[in-house]
Amino acid sequence: MEKETPSYEEWEAVKMKPSSYLKKIDKAIKGLEEAASAKDAIRAVKAYSKAMDKVLDDFGTVSLAYTLDTRDEENGKNQKAVDAATPLVQEASLPYARALLSSPYKDEIEARFGSHYLTMLEYQLKGFSPEVVALSQKENELGSRYDAVKSQAVVHFEGRDYGLGQIGAFYGDKDRNRRKAAQDAAIAAVNQIAPELEDIFDELVKIRNEKAHLLGFDSYSDLSYYLMGRYDYGRREVSSYREAIHEVVTPLAEKIAREEARALGLKRLSYEDLEVYYPDGNPLPRGSTEEKVDNARKMYGALSAETGRFFDFMVEKHLLFLEAKPGKALGGYMNYLPLKKCPVIFSNFNGTSGDIDVLTHEFGHAFQSYLARNIKLPDYRCPTMDGAEIDSMAMEFFAWPYMDLFFDEPDKYRYQHLASAILFLPYGVTVDEWQHWVYDHPEVGKAERRAAWKEIEAKYTPYKSRAYEGAGYLGEGLRWIMQGHVYSSPFYYIDYTLAQVVAFEFLALDQKDHERAWRKYVRLGSLGGKYPFQHLLKKAGLRSPLEEGALKKIVTPVKRILKIEEEKAYR
């Protein structure tokens, strides 16, 4: 792997020629249609996979450059080309799915690649058609516009200008007045761009609703289950799961919030307090970016030989893009580039504990791509999002024993990390339930969407609903405009919550039997996406959060761990 992968500086610039991608795909399809034997058909499947790897590698390379600097004119031009070409590739792939599913060698292909591959193609046919190409291009364009508007917003604070990805460094300041001033400055900046962001979303809802109707679905909510690859569960299971979160986790989240307020000497939390756990401020990681990376090398070297070698490879090939900069897109991600045989990690370090979360979370994604790198089918290399996020969130917990490398008070970090993970679950299902409501009611206006958000937010996170009163866009039912997934990856967010619950399984097991927990983790990552979500969990010996009563069983030992960590953090 290392010998075949060039360092970032050695990458060749991508010349976007959509016709070249389409020709390769068409050639593979023709080979499948004209196959005179099962061997020929399987060869065509492999040719198609190679063509798609070229698409994934080139488009990923372009998107990395764009997110590194959204202000660069050439980057913007290339990203627009990707936005336009992506639906064309999807359209060109439909004949491949039809040819394979109708092939006289379908049984032999299924025997070679598995029945799940055929199911994926069936979902692909249901979730896309030539009629929605232009709409998908516009949808992609709006997603990129959203990224640009957010990344170019300017926050004026203490005589300096910050991006929204940088100002968060002050949200955990021990001085309540200072962190309030920082939040107020950010709120003012977001208030300025809120009308444009709300307009972008309004257009997206109309486009997605139209796509759903063209594809024969009653709503985009229904279509989303096909687009997200939810092969073994549906809306009913997700709705029951959300209610289980409300029943089991919302009361626990309220308790954590009360303890947080008590520790801060407050009667209740206000918006400027939500991210602060200790009177003297949240624990901050030591050192520069380079020092954090060096300590991460020590951590992964100690965790296992394989993680050590792989992290060294990431550093030596300059595949970590970590620091927040003006013009850089917000957020963080991992993307695997199959021809370069490497992942990249993108983030926005801002000096908070979130920097360490990136080094564990996104590295978990990257390590999974490494474990599954020899899987030839692109569709099988990575799990669907619900499964993929397990790899990242569980890695955060496997890193717990090494937090003394980064923090002077690692106990405080561990409690904050676990409490935050629990608090995330009600918020995550808030996003999901609201999206279902929005796309089931596409005709409603902006005011109704805001009101629906406030109602659902008050149901799952009442402490936040109270804290946001009078806090600009936060108190006006517009918290969602800063959640990028709502714009670019609709219905993705529930996957984070499902994965977080499974990651809790790993946490509890790791504290009992590390070797067994690590074997299960490596097993899970190595399987890639060969199976749908619940089947994948079964293969790895894990419980599905969607099973009736599973959430309570998983959360019960986590409560005990939380109590232990709380006592250590506040002693």
Image (spheres, rainbow, N blue to C red):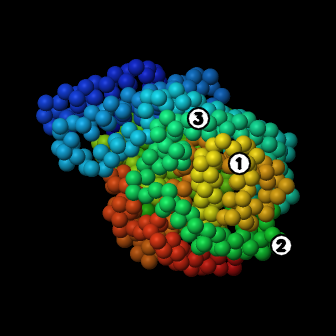
Q: Earlier in the sequence, mark 1 or mark 3?
A: 3
Picture residue at 47% right of the left edge, 66% below the top: 545
Number of the label disc, if any, that sits on residue 411: none
In the image shown, does 342 or 209 lie closer to the viewer?
209
Q: Nearer the viewer, mark 2 or mark 3?
A: 3
Where does the image place residue 543, in percent across and percent down from the top left? Answer: 41, 69
Q: Quadrant of the N terminus?
A: top left
Circle 2 crowding by C-alpha within 10 Å: few under 14, some 14–19, many from 20: few
Q: Quadrant of the C terminus?
A: bottom right
Decide if residue 108 is in sight here: yes
Q: Nearer the viewer, mark 1 or mark 2?
A: 1
At label 1, which amino acid type do we have? Answer: Arg
Q: Earlier in the sequence, mark 1 or mark 2?
A: 2
Marks 1 and 3 close (CB-CB < 8 Å) = no
- In terms of secondary structure, where does tag 2 sit? loop
In the image shown, does 466 or 356 lie closer to the viewer?
466
Number of the label disc, if any, that sits on residue 267: 2
Rounded to the nearest angstrom, the CA distance separating label 2 from label 3 is: 45 Å
Residue, disc 1: 449
Marks 2 and 3 close (CB-CB < 8 Å) = no
Picture residue at 41% right of the left edge, 71% below the top: 514
Quarter holding residue 442:
top right
Circle 1 crowding by C-alpha within 10 Å: few under 14, some 14–19, many from 20: many
Where does the image place residue 563, in percent across and percent down from the top left? Answer: 61, 79
Quarter holding residue 314:
top left
Q: Earlier in the sequence, mark 2 or mark 3?
A: 3
- In terms of secondary structure, where does tag 3 sit? helix
Decide if residue 8 is in sight here: no
At label 2, which amino acid type do we have? Answer: Lys
- In terms of secondary structure, where does tag 1 sit? helix
At label 3, which amino acid type do we have? Answer: Ile
